[in-house]
Amino acid sequence: MSPTVVPALARIPGSKSITNRALLLAAAAAGETLLGAPLVSDDTVAFRDGLRELGVEVVERDGGWLVRGLGRGPQGRGKVWCADAGTAGRFLPVFAAAGAGEFGFDGSEQLRVRPLGPLVKALEALGAEVLAGEGGGLPLRVRSTGLRGGELVLESGTSSQYLTGILLSAPLMERPLTVRAPGLVSKPYIDMTLAMMRHFGAAPAVGPDGRIQVPAGGYRARDLRIEPDASTASYVFAGAAVTGRSVTVRDLGSGSLQGDLRFAEVLRLTGAKVEIGPDATTVTGTGQLRGGFEVDMGDISDTFMTLAAIAPLADAPITITGIGHARLKESDRIAAMADNLRALGAEVADGPDWITITPGPLHPAEIACHRDHRIAMSFSVLGLRSAGITLDDPDCVSKTFPEFHQEFARLFG
Protein backbone atom coordinates (compact mmCIF):
# COMPACT_ATOMS: atom_id res chain seq x y z
CA MET A 1 0.00 0.00 0.00
CA SER A 2 1.49 3.35 -1.05
CA PRO A 3 2.05 5.96 1.68
CA THR A 4 -0.41 8.82 1.95
CA VAL A 5 0.82 12.03 0.34
CA VAL A 6 0.28 15.00 2.64
CA PRO A 7 -0.72 18.05 0.56
CA ALA A 8 1.33 21.20 0.86
CA LEU A 9 -0.71 24.35 1.44
CA ALA A 10 -0.03 26.90 -1.28
CA ARG A 11 -0.20 30.60 -0.44
CA ILE A 12 -1.98 32.04 -3.47
CA PRO A 13 -2.73 35.78 -3.46
CA GLY A 14 -6.17 37.23 -4.15
CA SER A 15 -7.75 37.15 -7.58
CA LYS A 16 -6.74 40.03 -9.82
CA SER A 17 -10.00 39.80 -11.74
CA ILE A 18 -12.11 39.93 -8.59
CA THR A 19 -9.98 42.60 -6.91
CA ASN A 20 -10.23 45.08 -9.77
CA ARG A 21 -13.92 44.46 -10.39
CA ALA A 22 -14.61 44.86 -6.68
CA LEU A 23 -12.63 48.10 -6.55
CA LEU A 24 -14.75 49.62 -9.30
CA LEU A 25 -18.04 48.36 -7.90
CA ALA A 26 -17.17 49.69 -4.44
CA ALA A 27 -16.15 53.02 -5.99
CA ALA A 28 -19.50 53.28 -7.80
CA ALA A 29 -21.54 52.31 -4.72
CA ALA A 30 -22.90 54.69 -2.13
CA GLY A 31 -21.17 54.08 1.22
CA GLU A 32 -18.05 52.31 2.48
CA THR A 33 -16.91 48.87 1.35
CA LEU A 34 -14.13 46.83 2.97
CA LEU A 35 -12.35 44.53 0.52
CA GLY A 36 -10.64 41.75 2.44
CA ALA A 37 -7.47 40.01 1.23
CA PRO A 38 -7.17 41.98 -2.04
CA LEU A 39 -4.35 41.21 -4.43
CA VAL A 40 -1.58 43.78 -4.04
CA SER A 41 0.36 43.72 -7.30
CA ASP A 42 1.35 46.02 -10.16
CA ASP A 43 -2.02 45.70 -11.90
CA THR A 44 -4.23 46.16 -8.85
CA VAL A 45 -2.18 49.06 -7.50
CA ALA A 46 -2.45 50.77 -10.90
CA PHE A 47 -6.22 50.24 -10.80
CA ARG A 48 -6.53 51.49 -7.21
CA ASP A 49 -4.41 54.57 -7.94
CA GLY A 50 -6.47 55.22 -11.07
CA LEU A 51 -9.62 55.33 -8.96
CA ARG A 52 -7.94 57.75 -6.58
CA GLU A 53 -7.16 60.03 -9.52
CA LEU A 54 -10.87 59.89 -10.38
CA GLY A 55 -11.77 61.14 -6.90
CA VAL A 56 -12.36 57.86 -5.04
CA GLU A 57 -10.86 57.47 -1.57
CA VAL A 58 -9.17 54.10 -1.00
CA VAL A 59 -7.31 53.51 2.28
CA GLU A 60 -5.69 50.52 3.97
CA ARG A 61 -7.81 49.04 6.75
CA ASP A 62 -7.56 45.73 8.66
CA GLY A 63 -5.27 44.14 6.07
CA GLY A 64 -7.57 45.13 3.22
CA TRP A 65 -8.74 48.19 1.33
CA LEU A 66 -11.56 50.42 2.50
CA VAL A 67 -13.28 52.13 -0.43
CA ARG A 68 -15.44 55.19 0.15
CA GLY A 69 -17.74 55.05 -2.84
CA LEU A 70 -19.01 57.99 -4.84
CA GLY A 71 -22.51 56.63 -5.39
CA ARG A 72 -22.20 57.88 -8.99
CA GLY A 73 -19.59 58.35 -11.71
CA PRO A 74 -16.54 60.63 -11.27
CA GLN A 75 -16.90 64.40 -11.61
CA GLY A 76 -14.42 66.99 -12.86
CA ARG A 77 -11.05 66.19 -14.40
CA GLY A 78 -8.36 63.55 -13.98
CA LYS A 79 -5.39 61.85 -15.62
CA VAL A 80 -5.08 58.12 -15.05
CA TRP A 81 -1.88 56.11 -15.59
CA CYS A 82 -2.91 52.52 -16.30
CA ALA A 83 0.66 51.12 -16.43
CA ASP A 84 0.39 47.58 -17.91
CA ALA A 85 -3.10 46.88 -16.53
CA GLY A 86 -5.57 46.00 -19.27
CA THR A 87 -8.47 46.08 -16.80
CA ALA A 88 -7.61 49.67 -15.85
CA GLY A 89 -7.42 50.71 -19.50
CA ARG A 90 -10.78 49.09 -20.29
CA PHE A 91 -12.90 49.49 -17.13
CA LEU A 92 -11.94 52.94 -15.84
CA PRO A 93 -12.72 54.97 -19.01
CA VAL A 94 -16.31 53.68 -18.91
CA PHE A 95 -16.63 54.55 -15.22
CA ALA A 96 -15.34 58.06 -15.96
CA ALA A 97 -17.75 58.46 -18.87
CA ALA A 98 -20.65 57.50 -16.59
CA GLY A 99 -19.85 60.66 -14.62
CA ALA A 100 -19.31 64.19 -15.87
CA GLY A 101 -16.06 65.84 -16.90
CA GLU A 102 -12.92 65.32 -18.97
CA PHE A 103 -10.54 62.48 -18.20
CA GLY A 104 -7.32 61.21 -19.73
CA PHE A 105 -6.02 57.64 -19.74
CA ASP A 106 -2.59 56.38 -20.77
CA GLY A 107 -0.36 53.42 -20.12
CA SER A 108 2.85 51.61 -20.98
CA GLU A 109 3.95 50.94 -24.54
CA GLN A 110 2.83 47.34 -24.01
CA LEU A 111 -0.67 48.50 -23.07
CA ARG A 112 -0.85 51.08 -25.86
CA VAL A 113 -0.68 48.38 -28.52
CA ARG A 114 -3.61 46.44 -27.05
CA PRO A 115 -6.80 47.20 -29.00
CA LEU A 116 -9.66 49.35 -27.67
CA GLY A 117 -11.70 49.93 -30.84
CA PRO A 118 -14.92 48.14 -29.80
CA LEU A 119 -14.93 49.91 -26.44
CA VAL A 120 -14.41 53.34 -27.99
CA LYS A 121 -17.30 52.74 -30.42
CA ALA A 122 -19.52 51.63 -27.56
CA LEU A 123 -18.77 54.72 -25.47
CA GLU A 124 -19.52 56.98 -28.43
CA ALA A 125 -22.79 55.15 -29.07
CA LEU A 126 -23.74 55.73 -25.42
CA GLY A 127 -23.14 59.47 -25.67
CA ALA A 128 -19.52 60.09 -24.68
CA GLU A 129 -16.91 61.92 -26.74
CA VAL A 130 -13.73 59.87 -27.02
CA LEU A 131 -10.42 60.79 -28.62
CA ALA A 132 -8.26 57.67 -29.04
CA GLY A 133 -4.57 57.35 -29.77
CA GLU A 134 -2.92 56.10 -32.92
CA GLY A 135 -4.30 52.67 -33.80
CA GLY A 136 -7.46 53.23 -31.76
CA GLY A 137 -5.96 52.48 -28.35
CA LEU A 138 -4.38 54.44 -25.51
CA PRO A 139 -3.94 57.29 -24.86
CA LEU A 140 -7.64 58.09 -24.53
CA ARG A 141 -9.37 61.35 -23.71
CA VAL A 142 -12.97 61.00 -22.55
CA ARG A 143 -15.43 63.89 -22.32
CA SER A 144 -18.88 63.12 -21.01
CA THR A 145 -21.92 64.34 -19.14
CA GLY A 146 -23.06 60.79 -18.45
CA LEU A 147 -23.98 57.69 -20.47
CA ARG A 148 -27.54 57.35 -21.70
CA GLY A 149 -28.03 53.57 -21.74
CA GLY A 150 -30.46 52.01 -24.19
CA GLU A 151 -29.64 49.37 -26.83
CA LEU A 152 -26.04 48.47 -27.63
CA VAL A 153 -24.25 45.93 -29.84
CA LEU A 154 -20.67 45.34 -28.65
CA GLU A 155 -18.23 43.28 -30.72
CA SER A 156 -16.67 40.87 -28.22
CA GLY A 157 -14.69 38.40 -30.31
CA THR A 158 -11.26 39.60 -29.15
CA SER A 159 -11.80 40.32 -25.46
CA SER A 160 -14.51 39.96 -22.84
CA GLN A 161 -13.08 43.00 -21.02
CA TYR A 162 -14.95 45.43 -23.30
CA LEU A 163 -18.26 43.92 -22.22
CA THR A 164 -17.24 43.78 -18.57
CA GLY A 165 -16.23 47.45 -18.67
CA ILE A 166 -19.63 48.45 -20.04
CA LEU A 167 -21.58 46.18 -17.67
CA LEU A 168 -19.82 47.35 -14.49
CA SER A 169 -20.89 50.95 -15.10
CA ALA A 170 -24.30 50.18 -16.63
CA PRO A 171 -26.28 50.77 -13.38
CA LEU A 172 -24.89 54.35 -13.38
CA MET A 173 -26.39 55.10 -16.80
CA GLU A 174 -29.45 57.32 -17.32
CA ARG A 175 -31.65 54.50 -18.64
CA PRO A 176 -31.56 50.70 -18.49
CA LEU A 177 -28.99 49.10 -20.81
CA THR A 178 -29.58 46.14 -23.10
CA VAL A 179 -26.40 44.83 -24.68
CA ARG A 180 -25.74 42.10 -27.23
CA ALA A 181 -22.18 40.79 -27.52
CA PRO A 182 -21.64 38.83 -30.75
CA GLY A 183 -18.65 36.49 -30.79
CA LEU A 184 -18.15 36.69 -27.02
CA VAL A 185 -14.96 34.99 -25.80
CA SER A 186 -14.03 34.06 -22.21
CA LYS A 187 -17.66 33.91 -21.08
CA PRO A 188 -16.78 32.78 -17.52
CA TYR A 189 -15.38 36.26 -16.91
CA ILE A 190 -18.78 37.74 -17.79
CA ASP A 191 -20.46 35.29 -15.41
CA MET A 192 -18.06 36.54 -12.71
CA THR A 193 -18.86 40.16 -13.54
CA LEU A 194 -22.63 39.60 -13.33
CA ALA A 195 -22.33 37.72 -10.02
CA MET A 196 -20.29 40.54 -8.50
CA MET A 197 -22.72 43.18 -9.78
CA ARG A 198 -25.51 41.31 -7.99
CA HIS A 199 -23.41 41.21 -4.80
CA PHE A 200 -23.37 45.02 -4.87
CA GLY A 201 -27.12 45.31 -5.40
CA ALA A 202 -27.56 45.49 -9.18
CA ALA A 203 -29.98 43.19 -11.00
CA PRO A 204 -28.56 42.21 -14.41
CA ALA A 205 -30.51 39.57 -16.32
CA VAL A 206 -29.46 37.37 -19.24
CA GLY A 207 -32.17 36.64 -21.77
CA PRO A 208 -32.63 33.39 -23.71
CA ASP A 209 -31.07 35.09 -26.76
CA GLY A 210 -27.95 35.98 -24.77
CA ARG A 211 -28.77 39.68 -24.44
CA ILE A 212 -27.90 41.18 -21.08
CA GLN A 213 -30.27 43.70 -19.51
CA VAL A 214 -29.12 45.97 -16.68
CA PRO A 215 -31.53 48.30 -14.87
CA ALA A 216 -30.35 51.75 -13.88
CA GLY A 217 -30.23 52.62 -10.18
CA GLY A 218 -26.64 52.29 -8.99
CA TYR A 219 -25.02 50.05 -6.38
CA ARG A 220 -25.03 49.56 -2.60
CA ALA A 221 -21.83 49.23 -0.59
CA ARG A 222 -21.21 45.70 0.66
CA ASP A 223 -18.05 44.16 2.09
CA LEU A 224 -16.33 41.38 0.14
CA ARG A 225 -13.46 39.02 0.86
CA ILE A 226 -11.38 38.28 -2.25
CA GLU A 227 -10.81 34.60 -3.02
CA PRO A 228 -7.40 33.30 -4.21
CA ASP A 229 -6.56 33.76 -7.88
CA ALA A 230 -7.48 30.64 -9.87
CA SER A 231 -5.26 31.58 -12.81
CA THR A 232 -2.28 31.86 -10.47
CA ALA A 233 -3.23 28.61 -8.76
CA SER A 234 -2.83 26.85 -12.13
CA TYR A 235 0.96 27.01 -11.74
CA VAL A 236 1.08 25.25 -8.38
CA PHE A 237 -1.52 22.70 -9.52
CA ALA A 238 0.58 21.96 -12.63
CA GLY A 239 3.69 21.83 -10.44
CA ALA A 240 2.05 19.10 -8.37
CA ALA A 241 1.07 17.21 -11.53
CA VAL A 242 4.59 17.13 -12.98
CA THR A 243 6.44 16.38 -9.72
CA GLY A 244 4.12 13.78 -8.24
CA ARG A 245 3.43 15.95 -5.20
CA SER A 246 0.15 17.14 -3.72
CA VAL A 247 -0.86 20.79 -3.36
CA THR A 248 -3.97 22.33 -1.78
CA VAL A 249 -5.30 25.85 -2.27
CA ARG A 250 -7.74 26.81 0.46
CA ASP A 251 -10.72 29.15 -0.05
CA LEU A 252 -10.82 28.17 -3.74
CA GLY A 253 -13.52 25.57 -4.19
CA SER A 254 -16.69 24.59 -5.98
CA GLY A 255 -18.36 27.93 -5.22
CA SER A 256 -15.61 29.95 -6.88
CA LEU A 257 -16.55 32.88 -9.10
CA GLN A 258 -13.57 32.14 -11.35
CA GLY A 259 -13.86 30.05 -14.49
CA ASP A 260 -10.11 29.40 -14.51
CA LEU A 261 -10.55 26.86 -11.72
CA ARG A 262 -11.59 24.60 -14.60
CA PHE A 263 -7.88 24.24 -15.33
CA ALA A 264 -7.88 21.64 -12.56
CA GLU A 265 -10.35 19.63 -14.65
CA VAL A 266 -7.93 19.84 -17.59
CA LEU A 267 -5.22 18.36 -15.37
CA ARG A 268 -7.50 15.34 -14.87
CA LEU A 269 -6.99 14.64 -18.58
CA THR A 270 -3.25 14.37 -17.91
CA GLY A 271 -3.77 11.76 -15.19
CA ALA A 272 -3.56 13.95 -12.09
CA LYS A 273 -5.94 13.35 -9.19
CA VAL A 274 -8.12 16.42 -8.62
CA GLU A 275 -10.40 17.08 -5.64
CA ILE A 276 -12.58 20.21 -5.77
CA GLY A 277 -14.43 20.61 -2.49
CA PRO A 278 -16.60 23.42 -1.15
CA ASP A 279 -13.68 25.17 0.55
CA ALA A 280 -10.50 23.98 -1.18
CA THR A 281 -8.99 22.36 -4.25
CA THR A 282 -6.25 19.72 -4.14
CA VAL A 283 -4.22 18.35 -7.05
CA THR A 284 -2.02 15.29 -6.65
CA GLY A 285 0.30 14.21 -9.43
CA THR A 286 1.89 10.94 -10.43
CA GLY A 287 4.94 12.60 -11.94
CA GLN A 288 3.94 11.25 -15.36
CA LEU A 289 1.64 13.20 -17.67
CA ARG A 290 -0.76 11.59 -20.12
CA GLY A 291 -1.15 13.22 -23.52
CA GLY A 292 -2.94 12.21 -26.68
CA PHE A 293 -5.87 14.57 -26.33
CA GLU A 294 -7.26 17.84 -27.70
CA VAL A 295 -8.85 20.42 -25.41
CA ASP A 296 -10.67 23.70 -26.11
CA MET A 297 -9.38 26.25 -23.59
CA GLY A 298 -11.06 29.30 -25.12
CA ASP A 299 -13.04 30.01 -21.97
CA ILE A 300 -9.96 29.67 -19.74
CA SER A 301 -7.32 31.03 -22.09
CA ASP A 302 -5.22 32.61 -19.31
CA THR A 303 -4.28 29.06 -18.31
CA PHE A 304 -3.58 27.56 -21.73
CA MET A 305 0.10 28.49 -21.35
CA THR A 306 0.36 26.46 -18.15
CA LEU A 307 -0.71 23.33 -20.04
CA ALA A 308 1.39 24.18 -23.11
CA ALA A 309 4.51 24.62 -21.00
CA ILE A 310 4.27 21.17 -19.41
CA ALA A 311 3.07 19.39 -22.57
CA PRO A 312 6.63 18.33 -23.61
CA LEU A 313 6.63 16.11 -20.50
CA ALA A 314 3.55 14.14 -21.60
CA ASP A 315 3.58 10.69 -23.22
CA ALA A 316 1.78 11.84 -26.41
CA PRO A 317 1.00 15.12 -28.21
CA ILE A 318 -1.42 17.65 -26.72
CA THR A 319 -3.44 20.09 -28.85
CA ILE A 320 -5.01 23.23 -27.36
CA THR A 321 -7.72 25.00 -29.40
CA GLY A 322 -10.04 28.00 -29.21
CA ILE A 323 -7.37 30.43 -28.04
CA GLY A 324 -7.09 32.91 -30.93
CA HIS A 325 -7.88 35.87 -28.66
CA ALA A 326 -4.75 35.03 -26.62
CA ARG A 327 -2.73 36.61 -29.44
CA LEU A 328 -4.03 40.03 -28.24
CA LYS A 329 -3.00 39.82 -24.58
CA GLU A 330 0.18 41.16 -22.94
CA SER A 331 1.98 39.43 -25.81
CA ASP A 332 0.99 37.22 -28.73
CA ARG A 333 0.82 34.34 -26.34
CA ILE A 334 0.49 31.56 -28.91
CA ALA A 335 3.57 32.78 -30.78
CA ALA A 336 5.50 33.36 -27.57
CA MET A 337 4.79 29.85 -26.28
CA ALA A 338 5.62 28.26 -29.64
CA ASP A 339 8.89 30.18 -30.03
CA ASN A 340 10.06 29.47 -26.49
CA LEU A 341 9.17 25.77 -26.66
CA ARG A 342 11.05 25.46 -29.95
CA ALA A 343 14.05 27.20 -28.36
CA LEU A 344 14.04 24.40 -25.78
CA GLY A 345 13.98 21.78 -28.54
CA ALA A 346 10.29 20.88 -28.49
CA GLU A 347 8.36 20.04 -31.63
CA VAL A 348 5.52 22.57 -31.97
CA ALA A 349 2.86 23.32 -34.59
CA ASP A 350 0.51 26.29 -34.30
CA GLY A 351 -2.22 28.11 -36.19
CA PRO A 352 -4.45 31.15 -35.74
CA ASP A 353 -6.23 29.74 -32.69
CA TRP A 354 -4.46 26.48 -31.78
CA ILE A 355 -1.16 24.95 -30.74
CA THR A 356 0.09 21.34 -30.72
CA ILE A 357 3.09 20.24 -28.66
CA THR A 358 4.76 16.87 -29.27
CA PRO A 359 6.76 15.44 -26.34
CA GLY A 360 10.48 14.98 -26.67
CA PRO A 361 13.83 15.70 -25.04
CA LEU A 362 14.58 19.33 -24.13
CA HIS A 363 17.81 21.27 -23.74
CA PRO A 364 18.66 24.38 -21.71
CA ALA A 365 17.57 27.79 -23.02
CA GLU A 366 16.66 31.27 -21.85
CA ILE A 367 12.95 32.04 -22.02
CA ALA A 368 11.87 35.30 -23.67
CA CYS A 369 9.17 36.55 -21.29
CA HIS A 370 8.00 39.53 -23.38
CA ARG A 371 7.23 41.28 -20.07
CA ASP A 372 4.38 38.78 -19.73
CA HIS A 373 3.94 37.38 -16.22
CA ARG A 374 2.16 34.26 -17.42
CA ILE A 375 5.03 33.23 -19.69
CA ALA A 376 7.47 33.49 -16.77
CA MET A 377 5.28 31.51 -14.41
CA SER A 378 4.37 28.82 -16.96
CA PHE A 379 7.97 28.02 -17.86
CA SER A 380 8.88 27.98 -14.17
CA VAL A 381 6.63 24.91 -13.93
CA LEU A 382 8.45 23.20 -16.80
CA GLY A 383 11.71 24.07 -15.05
CA LEU A 384 10.76 21.71 -12.23
CA ARG A 385 11.43 18.79 -14.59
CA SER A 386 13.74 20.24 -17.25
CA ALA A 387 17.12 21.56 -16.17
CA GLY A 388 18.72 24.74 -17.48
CA ILE A 389 15.63 26.88 -18.06
CA THR A 390 16.22 30.54 -17.22
CA LEU A 391 14.00 33.62 -17.60
CA ASP A 392 15.15 36.86 -19.23
CA ASP A 393 12.76 38.86 -17.03
CA PRO A 394 11.92 36.98 -13.82
CA ASP A 395 10.58 40.13 -12.14
CA CYS A 396 7.66 40.47 -14.59
CA VAL A 397 5.67 38.20 -12.25
CA SER A 398 5.07 41.31 -10.09
CA LYS A 399 2.14 42.11 -12.39
CA THR A 400 0.01 39.57 -10.50
CA PHE A 401 2.16 37.62 -7.98
CA PRO A 402 5.21 39.51 -6.67
CA GLU A 403 6.22 36.61 -4.38
CA PHE A 404 5.80 33.90 -7.02
CA HIS A 405 9.41 32.69 -7.15
CA GLN A 406 9.72 32.49 -3.36
CA GLU A 407 6.45 30.59 -2.99
CA PHE A 408 7.30 28.22 -5.84
CA ALA A 409 10.65 27.46 -4.26
CA ARG A 410 8.99 26.83 -0.88
CA LEU A 411 6.54 24.37 -2.41
CA PHE A 412 8.81 22.55 -4.85
CA GLY A 413 12.41 23.33 -3.91
Image (cartoon, rainbow, N blue to C red):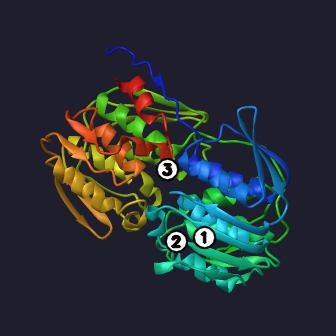
Exactly how many numbered labels are in the figure?
3
Q: Which residue is mark 3?
A: 260
Give residue 197's mark. Answer: none
In which quadrant is the N terminus drawn?
Answer: top left
- Residue drawn at (82%, 57%), measured in percent from left and top? 29
Q: Secondary structure at mark 3?
A: helix
Q: Which residue is mark 1?
A: 163
Callout 2 crowding tier (Cα within 10 Å): few <14, some 14–19, many ≥20: some
User: What is the x, y in percent for residue 7?
Assistant: 45, 22
Amino acid found under the numbered disc labelled 3: Asp
- Residue drawn at (82%, 54%), measured in percent from left and top? 69
Q: Secondary structure at mark 1?
A: helix
Label 3 and label 2: CA atoms lie apart by 17 Å
Label 1 and label 2: CA atoms lie apart by 9 Å
- Residue drawn at (31%, 43%), measured in percent from left and top? 379
In which quadrant is the C terminus drawn?
Answer: top left
Instruction: For residue 388, say whether it is visible.
Output: yes
Q: Nearer the viewer, residue 97 or 260?
A: 97
